[in-house]
Amino acid sequence: MMNTPVVTAIFLTSALFIALLVLIAVASRHKKRSTGALSLIGRSARVETELQPEGSAIVDGELWRARLSGSAPEALERGQLARVVGASGYLLEVEPEKNDG
């Protein structure tokens, strides 16, 4: 028959292992694609928080930090459309979307 300390040690080790797996799974769900920034160049973005010159924008359903390019106006308001023209790490460089209408 097994000792109580042995059963307790096995239980705690198993629980710690399962908790670690859950933590890794949860953390990985919140990471952006590592090569995603480069593939977003040319895509349309919707400003989420005012860009003056930095803020955030949503591209393909993901929230990104964004900065206006040097040739852009002083600010873009929430809801305005922008075009991704560059990226540096997880910071996108955007300029106002040009309307062809």
Image (cartoon, grey):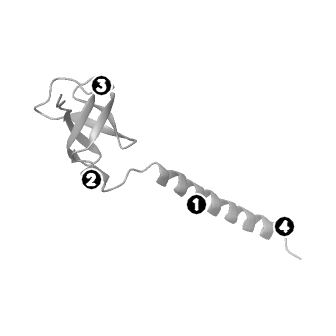
Residue type, label 3: Glu
User: Considering only vertical position in the picture, is 71 above or below 16?
Assistant: above
Discs 3, 4 touching: Cβ within 8 Å: no
Discs 2, 1 touching: Cβ within 8 Å: no
Task: State the residue position of label 2.
Answer: 39
Closest to the camera, between mark 1 and mark 4, is 1
The residue at 17%/23% (across/down) is 74
- Quarter of the picture holding the N terminus: bottom right
Taking the image as shown, residue 75 lies to the left or right of residue 65, namely left
Secondary structure of the residue carrying tag 3 is loop
Residue 64 sits in quarter: top left
* Marks 3 and 1, how far apart at CA: 38 Å
x and y, in percent, of residue 42 in the image: 21, 45
- Please tell me how crowded label 2 is: few (under 14), some (14-19), or many (20+) other residues with Cα within 10 Å: few
Taking the image as shown, residue 87 lies to the left or right of residue 72, namely right
Residue type, label 1: Leu
* Marks 1 and 4, how far apart at CA: 26 Å
Task: State the residue position of label 4.
Answer: 4
Residue 21, numbered label: 1
Task: State the residue position of label 3.
Answer: 50
Judge by depth and name the residue closer to the eye, 4 or 92.
92
The residue at 42%/50% (across/down) is 31
Secondary structure of the residue carrying tag 4 is helix
Residue at the far bottom: name it: 1
Pointer 3 or 4: first along the chain: 4
The residue at 36%/54% (across/down) is 33
Residue type, label 4: Thr
Residue type, label 2: Ser
- Quarter of the picture holding the C terminus: top left
User: Considering only vertical position in the picture, is 32 above or below 82?
Assistant: below
Residue at the far front: name it: 101
